[in-house]
Image (cartoon, helix red, strand yellow):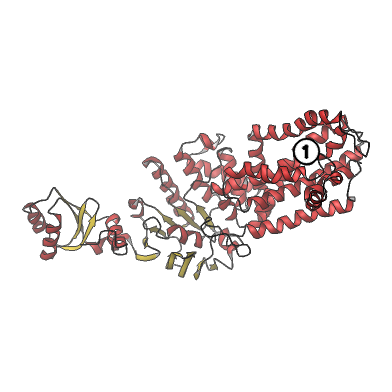
Amino acid sequence: MSSAIEAEGLGRDYGSVRALEGLELVVPHGSAVGLLGPNGAGKTTAMLLLATLLSPTRGSARVFGHDVVRDRRAVRRRLGLVFQETTVDGLLTVEENLLFAARLAGLGGRLARAAVSDAMGRAGLAQHARQPARELSGGWRRLADVVRATLHQPDLLILDEPTVGLDPEHRDAVWALLDAQRRTHGTTVLFSTHYLAEAEPADRVVLLARGRVVADDAPGALRAELGEEIAEIEGPGADRLARALRGLGAARVVLRTGRGIRAGITGQREPVVELAGGAPGIERFTLRPTTLEDVYFARTQSHADADVPEPV
Amino acid sequence: MSAWSTVHGIVARDLSRATRQTSRLLGGVARPFMWLLLVGTGYNTIARLESGLPYQAFVVPGIIVMAALFGGTLTAVSTVYDREFGMLRLMLASPAGLHAVLAGRAIAATLVGVFQGGIVLAFAPLVLHLGAERWLMGLAALAAVSAMSAMLGLLMAARIRSVENFAGIINVVLFPLLFLSGALYPTDGMPPGLRAVARANPVTYAVDLVRHALGQPAEVGSLTAAGVVLGVLVLAFVLAALLFDPEQRFFPRRPGAGAAVSSP
């Protein structure tokens, strides 16, 4: 499979602040890649660099073989962008907003109108076509924003937190739209999100912390590194139980969160449950499947500041 | 084709926005008439001009320029609103690039200026003797003045970060430009210092261009006036393109003034 994105040591500074250290990234054509990480990790900067909206301080990147600095127009022709903030003009109707976006993308005349009509039909927006966008709910406005990015059938969609602030119904609608886009046009999708469950179906997850890539693999492989299950432990005896689990060889990784301790459990669960059952000072002990959220905590904590609790 | 579609999209959007902001549009039309009727009528009784023109007839070109200046500039400055709410970044991500975006915004702002100034021009025959030829020449001059105003607005918008600064633009930039232009009173009676400022003010030449077009005596020649208006228009476009350069390669922004976006 050919590469949609290739970044080598891509970095950006804002004055003395290193927003992105040096991103190494290869995104195969047609794949879906989640860019995850805490606020300020460099996700938006990475996306703006790849979208040609920011020039790199160091390194280079190519989108479908086009350099993001030297050949911006060629890159932009193949891109669809969704920013963190919704870019829908409240004074215009939904149809006018989409027509504006289609023309910005270079579609003219009948082609633009046909693309808008088709997109509104696909996204269920036809009923709101003549409605001023300011009268729409946040969910519909965001859906219109995502539809806007797909009007010209881009080969690559870059979406910066496309579902932020949406209810589950509209989040589902946004992902259904993106899935359909991938299925029908083979569009490559690079997205960021703080709803980590949304990244579970992705082909790959790239985790950033403080401007550096701290993990880059398929979600299943990243989860497997922590263990099949996670033990959530709360109470004054949590530290002691975590040490005991390590001593038993059952806990592969032990993390401290705001509410207690999470331990990545591997091997037989019975000895773990037995040990926890007899441990003093435990207010809550739960075993559950490992998620990307656990990977997030594990990988970002080990690259965090000193004032953030270190892994035990 | 691609760049034209982008320009078309921006013009259509900006004009739709302008027509839906009715209070702003009506205010833009009412402002010059308030000056023409209230100030003009009052001054008509006391002002004695060397040219022998009644004051109300003298002030018509200035009022036309006022309408074009406020209409064109403020429409262009709404780019600041688009920057604040992310729309400018969407436009700059267009394959057509920065120049098409600036051209689209300038054309839309020019059309708003022509509309607002054109209403004054439409009523000008009530106080001026205007044949069809003079009227059409006035319309052409108005288009040039509106285009210059639009580009001056974009130039201001290049570095303004917040829509709250709009009021400041009107009070600190537009009114001084207007008062020191010969739009409302001749500049040749001004103290030498202010007269020198008026000579350096592009709006002075805009007013004289309209005066020539409408057949009134002016302080500078018609070719000079047209040359300065068109020269400022081109210079403002070039400067705006450099100032909108997101990487600030030519005019660095002070640190912490906000992240930029890129363009070709």
Label 1 amino acid? Gly
- Quadrant hosting residue A222: bottom left
Report whether A284 appears left or right of B60: left
Q: From the viewer's perspective, is residue A25 above or below residue A183?
A: below
Name the chain under label 1: B
Provide the secondary structure element on which disc 1 rests.
helix
Q: Report which residue position mark 1 lands on.
A: B117
- Relative placement, left or right, of A288 versus A161 is left
Note whether residue B7 is visible. no
In the picture as drawn, the residue positioned furthest to the left comes out as: A278
Residue B131 against residue B106 in the figure, above or below: above
Label 1 packing within 10 angstroms: few (<14), some (14-19), many (20+) = many
Coordinates of residue B113 in the picture (x, y in percent): 74, 41
Image x and y of residue B145, in percent = 78, 46
Q: In this view, does B162 lie above or below A41?
A: above
Place of residue A226 in the rendered image (x, y in percent of width and height, measured from the top left): 23, 62
- Look at the image and tell me whether residue A301 can be seen: yes
Q: In which quarter of the image is residue A91?
A: top right
Residue located 57% across and 40% down the image: A95
- The foreground one among A89 and A17 is A17
Q: Nearer the viewer, residue A199 or B253?
A: B253
